[in-house]
Image: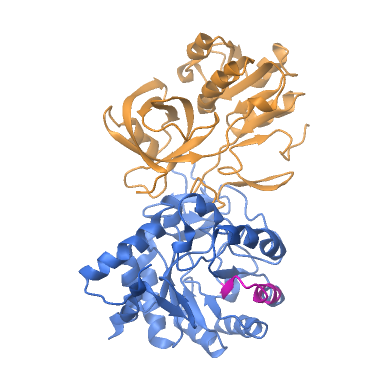
Chain colours: A orange, B blue
Amino acid sequence: MGERIKQYRIISNWNLADQVYEMELEGDSSWITHPGQFLNVTIDNAYLKRPISICDWNENGLTIIYKVVGFGTKQMSQKQPGELLECLVGLGNGFTPEAFDEKKVLLVGGGVGVPPLYGLAKTCLKQGKQPVVILGFTAEKDIFYIKKFADLGCDVKLSTNDGSQGVKGFVSDVMIQEGLTNLPYFACGPMPMLKAVWRTSNAQGQLSFEERMGCGFGACMGCSCETISGPKRICKEGPVLSSQEVLWTKD
Amino acid sequence: MDERLKVTLSGWELDNPVIPASGTFGFGYEFADFYDINILGSIATKGTTREARFGNPTPRIAECERGMINAVGLQNPGIDKVISEEFPKLKQVYQKKVVANVSGFSKEEYVECAKKMDAQDIVGILEVNISCPNVHGGGMSFGVSPDAAAEITRAVKAVTTKPVYIKLSPNVTDIVAIAKACEDAGADGISMINTLLGARFDLRTGRPIIANVMGGFSGPAIKPVALRMVYQVYEAVKLPIIGIGGIASAEDVIEMMYAGATAVEIGAENLRNPYVCKEIIERLPSLMDELNIEKLSDVIGRAHQ
């Protein structure tokens, strides 16, 4: 077995919100250098692995949060504590909050884009920054991790599309209402959310992208996107790209 | 290095027959993070065109039972950057020659790429892709007609002294006729097969998973098709064949060589297990012992005896 294919022991695997699971894994975390990196989970009887971002880590292991959207993630959700999970590790660039001098920063997450922001919030706090966190979900049944962010000492704001909790609307509505459009930001979530955050903010930031991947380590070019500086592979030069690299327009 | 694994392609002796396939290994250096890529027989580099290409819109990957569909569409930085940037990066971690894969949308484009590759010491074989299913108005359209395949072969042969291997498409009614046309036009070898055209649809939305709808299907599921076609072409032409299609193990390598391949390319499997080529090379000697194979080159075409 290759040295970047690792076995992890499942410590816990439980239902956090509608179709969303948190899995705690014991094993090597020494490869993690930045929040927002990911691993690629081997699924029995599936050809490709499943890329899942790291939510949190310590010297004993790491935590991932994933949503059941198909055969592979369903299989993950049925794994029991004590079982092993095989993963290809060391993937992705991750967020670099140290790239900004500002103390106060904005973290914006939508749905299963929220998990990598938890590790990022911890990193920001270690660097002496004050993270303001906006979490967006579709409805009350989808909400997770608000208390976890609050327990870290973050200022947490919430939106739901249907208004069942927090501000009714989108994370970008919260940005405007709360006057957070001038803070350096870090965002992870579905593409429409990333675009809305980018358009709403007057500041620079870092955006974590999602795409269907073949390999996860830069070989197949399946997940490429076009940027100001040419094509970038989401899995290799990303998943985090600078807000200055995207080819979107403000209107 | 195990002497028993050596094979020869058009006078070029490879340490072993294991070559990562074009499009699944980038320009090679990405895999140096995983293992010493000098253990490979060679590397088939990413399909290169005259101009830089982004390729098709995403999503361009879909999973299948025992395989995958890709519709990347020849993303590459263009031949000039491949020569000025990618090959030098590869040379820092790799000392052998490569199988340089080139593609085009016109005869002139193939010729221009071939000329430029001809001047590169790192190029051991020129692999001419007339079979990419993911680009319109080129690629595969040359690979589906014997006359067009012969025309490209002749044009490329006229501008290079490197061995020219034509990479064939399985998406044809008679692959033997196309292989013969390439042989008659002066090809030095055949690489086969490229991917099969496939599609997947999302169960919930009913929409295609791939933005381009169709893409190239590869992986272990296509191995029997590749074995059958290599067997047929080996019967009909005298050229060496690089066998490609669904190879995922040392067993698969030997089976493909039985069918008639002198060497093999390993494609999709690199994407699910980046160590697969290394594992195969390490496994081959003990498997040969189990099968009473003295030299790997002895088994080429054994299925035809």
The quadrant in which the C terminus of chain A is found is top right
Which is nearer the eye, B136 or B301? Answer: B301
Would residue A226 be counted in the magenta stretch? no
Q: Is residue A27 left or right of residue B36?
A: left
Looking at the image, which residue sits at the far bottom? Answer: B184
- In the image, residue A97 above or below residue A129: below
Which is nearer the eye, B254 or A33? Answer: A33
State the extent of the magenta-drawn residues as a range: B112-130
Q: Where residue A230 appears, x then y in whole percent?
A: 71, 48
Residue A26 quadrant: top left
Residue B285 quadrant: bottom left
Q: Where residue B131 appears, x then y in whole percent?
A: 55, 70
Q: Residue at x 31, y 66 (%)?
A: B284
Which is nearer the eye, B204 or B30? Answer: B30
Would residue B117 be counted in the magenta stretch? yes
- The reply to whether residue A164 is in sight is yes
Question: How many dots with numbers?
Answer: 0
Q: Where residue A84 appears, x then y in whole percent?
A: 30, 35
- In the image, residue B124 above or below residue A31: below
- The reply to whether residue A160 is in sight is no
Residue B140 quadrant: bottom right
Q: Where residue A45 appears, x then y in whole percent?
A: 32, 47
Q: Residue at x 46, y 85 (%)?
A: B239
Q: Is residue A28 left or right of residue A184?
A: left
Q: Is residue B235 left or right of residue A208?
A: left
